[in-house]
Image: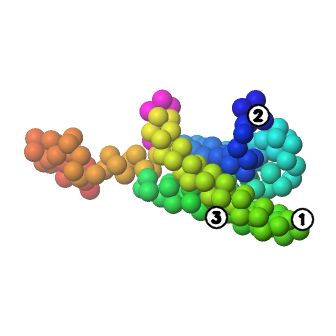
Amino acid sequence: DFIIHSPQPTYFIPMASMGMIIVLLAGFNLGFLCVISMSFLISLLVGGGIEVMFVLFTGSITGMFFVKEARRRSQILLAGLFVGIAKILAIACISFINSLGLDFFIEEGIWCISSGILSGVIVMVLLPVFEYFFKVPTNISLLELSDLNHPLLKKVAIEAPGTYHHSIM
């Protein structure tokens, strides 16, 4: 209901965040299936047709590919930027096919970039919450735990150097 009666444009929907979170937590295949179904359902809800589905799907798939092997949280924000760029390219295709004006492309392009960046921010905020509640470690959280400056690793290095060395190896 929120999506249907929302005052912002349809292309501002940050659906890519859902796909990126699912890829990080459960894998690419499940994320792909969810993105296909959600882009179809959202396009039906907003009455946007194939154009809305194409833009949402393109942005989501791009975000999923960029976070698939993410090893740092900064890569998530970069993926959000690429989501926005992919959505702009999808808008350009729609604008070209339907002979829409440059003003449509510019206005919707701004919303697409904003949506991509918002998707990255949403993933950055929600990923640690989902990791905690579902007890699912991601590549990012495992790399954070392997930081040699972690207080627990420092304590092990002082109190049990053999165990520390074995753990590092």
Give the secondary structure at mark 3.
helix
Q: Residues within 10 Å of mark 1 (few under 14, many from 20)?
A: few
Residue placed under numbered mark 3 in the picture: 85
Q: Quadrant of residue 34?
A: top right
**Amino acid bearing label 2:** His
Outermost front residue:
103
Q: CA distance from mark 3 to mark 1?
A: 20 Å
- Image position of 41 (left or right of 31): right
Indicate the quadrant containing the C terminus: top left, top right, bottom left or bottom right. bottom left
Q: How many marks do you count on the picture?
A: 3
Res 2 visible: yes
Dot label at residue 5: 2
Region in magenta: 132-137
Q: Position of residue 75 (x, y in %)?
A: 48, 58
Above/below status of 84 relative to 102? above
- Which residue was labeled with disc 1? 98
